[in-house]
Amino acid sequence: MQKRQVQEFMTAFGGLVDHCFVSCVDDFTSKALSTRETGCINRCVLKWMATQQRVSDRFQEHNQNLAQQQANQASR
Amino acid sequence: MQKRQVQEFMTAFGGLVDHCFVSCVDDFTSKALSTRETGCINRCVLKWMATQQRVSDRFQEHNQNLAQQQANQASR
Amino acid sequence: MQKRQVQEFMTAFGGLVDHCFVSCVDDFTSKALSTRETGCINRCVLKWMATQQRVSDRFQEHNQNLAQQQANQASR
Amino acid sequence: MSFLGMGRPQPTSEQKIEAVEAEMLAMASSYNSLQKNCQAKCIPNDFREAELNKGESVCLDRCVSKFLDTTQKVSEIMQQQGQQQGMQQGGSGGLF
Amino acid sequence: MSFLGMGRPQPTSEQKIEAVEAEMLAMASSYNSLQKNCQAKCIPNDFREAELNKGESVCLDRCVSKFLDTTQKVSEIMQQQGQQQGMQQGGSGGLF
Amino acid sequence: MSFLGMGRPQPTSEQKIEAVEAEMLAMASSYNSLQKNCQAKCIPNDFREAELNKGESVCLDRCVSKFLDTTQKVSEIMQQQGQQQGMQQGGSGGLF
């Protein structure tokens, strides 16, 4: 279970790196990240975390509503 | 093996949901699926199942042909 | 570990087939690969292997540099 | 939560565990897919701001709702098609 | 079916099992990839009809054939390049 | 190599093994992602030549460097945000 969580985190982390790299890095005339690219990556990560959090909150609400409905049906 | 089948079904099911959501849902001015979106999802699932079936039939034919060829070679 | 390597190879091989199929095959007026498609697949595989090799070399260099830096820090 | 309708007719305890695992797996993949798809639908890729703005937030809320409804809808259609019966009875699920 | 040419020189039974597993895995991933790619090449994303029309059906048939030929071709080219030898002899397959 | 900063406070040997596995997994997925992304950024899809030309080679070299720096950067930002603490303490990592 612990291992599963690590794997899920890994998948999410890998997806985040992919996402910000694809979106922010496209200048290959130099070897180092430019100031613009670094700024973009920073905003990309923060926005991704905010997005994950909001989606996660809505998903949990949905599951609680569902559990509530099932409990109501069972006790009827 | 049972578990593997479940996993494969899960992967296929997840792929189908992704596919029909990406293709059919793009109006976020309301919270509920519109009639148009629901109709599109319906056709998307049915077409996906027909596609899977046809590709699966061709794939099996191919494997049988291959097995036949190998049997012929072995008995020569 | 052996099994892991096989799986990694499988993933890479599958990715390569996908990549060359998507890039090279787009004429479905016949059942067999055309000369143009076959040539494209050939160049696609060779270029993919050269790309993998170069990226792999740079990745190893990077890891060696990192290990070197850590060793230097530890012995300071 | 049993949107796949698994393990209905008097399951053994092993089958129960497998059914729970399958549902968790379904939830996990559904959750990852939810995150990825709603990100793609609602968040532009230029990243001029680090915060979610009002429009993006509302879009995400509706997207979650629509994605979960889509999952439910797809599952219902497949059940209607009797596709899953074959699967549950251990038959070849049309995959190989 | 041994399109990866695994386990040739007198394999132990454990090696045989691993080789079979590897081939099944190869077939499974190849099959999923086949489905995904032929769907993408032959089926438009607007979903105005629920049935496959004639053109789409024929496209799928040819696509399956071309995808499997592509798999075969890629495998042959890689074998020619001797890439797989290194892999099979337990050497570092160039990955790490 | 511990770019995820795992297993810091006096880990048991089991935790150590898990941390190593996690890092290998991180490296493996990072490596596959590196290959895929740099291929996509630097290699055009028309395949008129089988060899890497000068421009493509230089692009790949810089791409590897930028991708690894991006990985590092993303990891640092997440650590600053204290996201990983919750994860390591076995708490619900915000996923479910």
Image: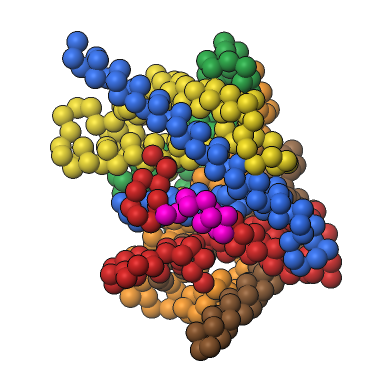
Chain colours: A green, B brown, C blue, D orange, E red, F yellow
User: What x and y, as percent, mark residue C25?
Assistant: 73, 54
Let me know if residue E78 is in the magenta part: yes
Q: Main secondary structure of the magenta part?
A: helix
Q: Quadrant of the N terminus of chain F?
A: top left
Image position of B71 (left or right of F47): left
Residue numbers of the magenta segment = E75-85
Question: Is residue C54 shown to the viewer in this render?
Answer: yes
Question: Is residue B20 shown to the viewer in this render?
Answer: no
Q: Residue at x 80, y 65 (%)?
A: C30
Image position of F26 (left or right of C21): left
Image position of F73 (left or right of D72): left
- Which of the pair A32/B69 is nearer the observer? B69
Let me know if residue E59 is in the magenta part: no
Answer with the quarter of the image where residue A38 lies. Answer: top right
Q: Residue at x 57, y 55 (%)?
A: E77
Vertical arrangement, residue C53 with respect to residue F5, above or below: below
Q: Farthest bottom residue?
A: B75
- Which of the pair C73/E5 is nearer the observer? E5
How many numbered marks are there? 0
Q: Quadrant of the C terminus of chain F?
A: top left
Q: Residue at x 83, y 63 (%)?
A: C29
User: What x and y, as percent, mark residue B44?
Assistant: 72, 60
User: What x and y, as percent, mark residue D49?
Assistant: 61, 18
Q: Residue at x 41, y 20 (%)?
A: F76
Answer with the quarter of the image where residue C35 lies. Answer: bottom right
User: What x and y, as percent, mark residue E56?
Assistant: 80, 65
Image position of F77 (left or right of E76): left
